[in-house]
């Protein structure tokens, strides 16, 4: 399984202010679903940061997203290892298949693949 990108997720109700601030550092908006906004570097598109007020289908806001090339294999691996699944594997209407898992530090990781 290969990691495609890692994106920190900041729990925030200040998407507009965050967009303006990170814009000063060269980031541009690449996604806005109303409850999550993602900014990326135009020169390095995988360099991203997200701001999330809440998660539309999950019980918590994750601390980070990890996009992998095989989300089903990742899900099987973390379940087999006995990791805590915070949000089950499912297809989301915005085009991703994902699950949330808690890491050994207590952080919630959104593991996803695009469909």
Image (cartoon, helix red, strand yellow):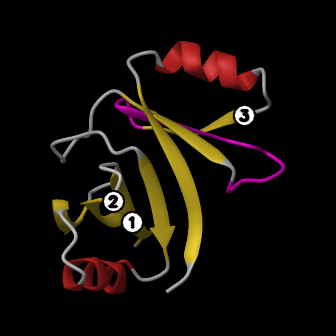
Q: Residue at x 78, y 53 (%)?
A: 44
Q: Position of residue 96 (x, y in %)?
A: 36, 64
Binning the other alpha carbons within 10 Å of mark 1 as few (below 14), some (14 to 19) or many (20 upward) gives many
Q: Nearer the viewer, mark 3 or mark 2?
A: 2
Q: Is residue 39 visible?
A: yes
Q: Residue furthest front?
A: 105
Residue 104 position by quadrant: bottom left
Checking the image for residue 27, the label placed there is 3
Quarter of the image where one finds residue 55: top left
Element type at marker 1? strand
Residue drawn 27% across the image and 61% down it = 101
Q: Residue at x 18, y 64 (%)?
A: 84
**60 vs 26: above or below:** below
Q: Are dots 3 and 1 in contact, CB under 8 Å?
A: no
Q: CA distance from mark 1 to mark 2?
A: 15 Å
When the figure is inspected, residue 107 is found, relative to residue 29, above or below; the finding is below
Left or right: 17 as drawn, with respect to 59: right
Measured Cα–Cα span from mark 3 to mark 2: 28 Å
The disc, 3 or 2, on the residue closer to the chain's N-terminal end is 3
Specify which label sits upstream in the sequence, 3 or 1.
3
Foreground residue among 102 and 76: 102
Residue 82 on the magenta segment: no
Q: Earlier in the sequence, mark 1 or mark 2?
A: 2
Residues rendered magenta in the picture: 33-46
Residue 91 location in percent, x, y?
A: 24, 67
Looking at the rendering, in which quadrant would you find the C terminus? bottom left
Indicate the position of residue 82 as horizontal and vertical percent values. 18, 76
The disc at residue 112 is: 1
Q: Place residue 98 in its image quadrant.
A: bottom left
Disc 2 target residue:
103
User: Farthest residue in the right direction?
Assistant: 43
């Amino acid at each position: 399984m290969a990691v495609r990108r890692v994106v920190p997720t900041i729990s925030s109700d200040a998407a507009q202010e965050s967009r303006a601030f990170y814009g000063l550092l060269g980031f541009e908006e690449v996604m806005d679903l109303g409850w999550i906004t993602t900014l990326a570097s135009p020169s390095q598109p995988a360099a991203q940061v997200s701001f999330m007020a809440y998660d539309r289908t999950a019980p918590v806001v994750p601390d980070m997203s990890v996009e992998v090339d095989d989300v089903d294999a990742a899900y099987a691996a973390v379940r087999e290892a006995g990791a805590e699944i915070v949000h089950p594997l499912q297809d989301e209407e915005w085009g991703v298949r994902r699950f949330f898992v808690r890491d050994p530090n207590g952080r919630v990781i959104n593991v996803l693949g695009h469909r």
